[in-house]
Image (tube, rainbow, N blue to C red):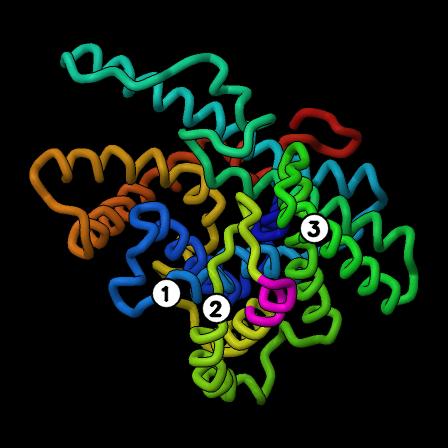
Amino acid sequence: MSEIYPREKEVEKPRIAYIDFMKCLCIMLIVMYHIDHGFFNYLAPHLNDALQAFRLPMYYFISGIFFKLYDGYADFTRRKVNNILVPFVFFVVFAFVVRSLEYGLRVAVGADPIELTLTQLVEPFYLRYWPNTTPLWFLLSLFWVNIIFYALQRWIRPLWAILLATMALSVVGYELGIHHVELPLMMDTSLVALPYFVLGWGVKRLGAVPPSRWDRWGIVALMVVALPIYWLNEFMNLHFQVLPAYWKLYLVPFVAILALFWACKPLPRIPVMNHFGRYSLIILGTHPLILQPIRFLLVRSGMDYGIQLTLIVFTLTMLVEWPLIWLLKTYFPRFTAQKPFFGDGWKLR
């Protein structure tokens, strides 16, 4: 999501409607997955595994589309810190504050207290999993993907060599994953995810981002590949490095991502979807804090787990996100990648 919010200057750049739609689709699938991991399997066996083929890889792909070298390593790093690491730290602190309020409320009404310690503020920097805002692992991974690819761009000139180096690094990440070797700060996942990012960069390099007369065939391509993707899918989890065969790790997601990208290009602007897509970073950082208490209250009221519960929790979560997005982008723009936290020369803005 490094360049999903490219707002370094006060003058806002034009939005690409279908890109915002794709981000909305991804974040909605992520929210649904975190409400009920098996929700889509109610619709078809192993459908959730098929959706894994593009749910998170698509985000890396979109970020790769917006990759730029900028004005050198210091300027590039500053922008990535502004757009990725500052929001990461902010949402970790935000989650701790919200959980602290929940802790106080539970004590006040005599409910069972939740576990809350100061170590939860630093756990995201050294643990693989933390309970309050688990999805934020993606931001750490995306930061390293950007840094790694920047280094490849600076150190290697021939295109074939960049692609070869990308493949080599992905093999290293894959071997680390299947042997359960974890690197700090999600660096092992970043190596595995690098090709998805490079795919987006390659699509932009080929000039496929602007509208084309061929775009109307995208939906046909998506329908053609949908069934093979469904049958070839295999469970994968980039967070915990649960990986399928190497060729499935990339071939299936590449086909799914490109087909969905192509199919989305002709879409017009859809206000609600584009709004959620535009601010999907905020949704990523806040949705667990919303859905968990909503689901808890509904279950306590007697509702059983299943399709109905999931859809109600999802709807209420997205409704709460709407004013929360406004609140955070209005009053905390420098912490949510809407404005730069560090200006030129790493000066606080």
Q: Is residue 2 left or right of residue 44?
A: right
Q: Amino acid at mark 1?
A: His
337 relative to 246, above or below: above
Q: CA distance from mark 2 to mark 1?
A: 8 Å
91 relative to 244, above or below: above
Mark 1 or mark 3: whose residue is earlier in sequence: 1
The foreground one among 229 and 256 is 229
The residue segment tinted magenta is 245-252
Q: CA distance from mark 1 to mark 3?
A: 25 Å
x then y, percent, for residue 258: 57, 73
x then y, percent, for residue 308: 16, 54
Q: Which residue is mark 1?
A: 46
x then y, percent, for residue 55: 47, 59
In magenta stretch: residue 290: no
Badge number at residue 190 = none
Q: Which residue is mark 3?
A: 175
Majority secondary structure in the magenta region: helix
Residue at position x 32%, y 67% in the image: 45
Circle 2/circle 1 CB separation < 8 Å: yes
Mark 2 or mark 1: whose residue is earlier in sequence: 1
- Crowdedness of circle 2 by 10 Å Cα count: few (<14), some, many (20+)? many
Q: Is residue 205 left or right of residue 335?
A: right
Q: Kindly state the secondary structure of the residue where label 1 is placed.
A: loop
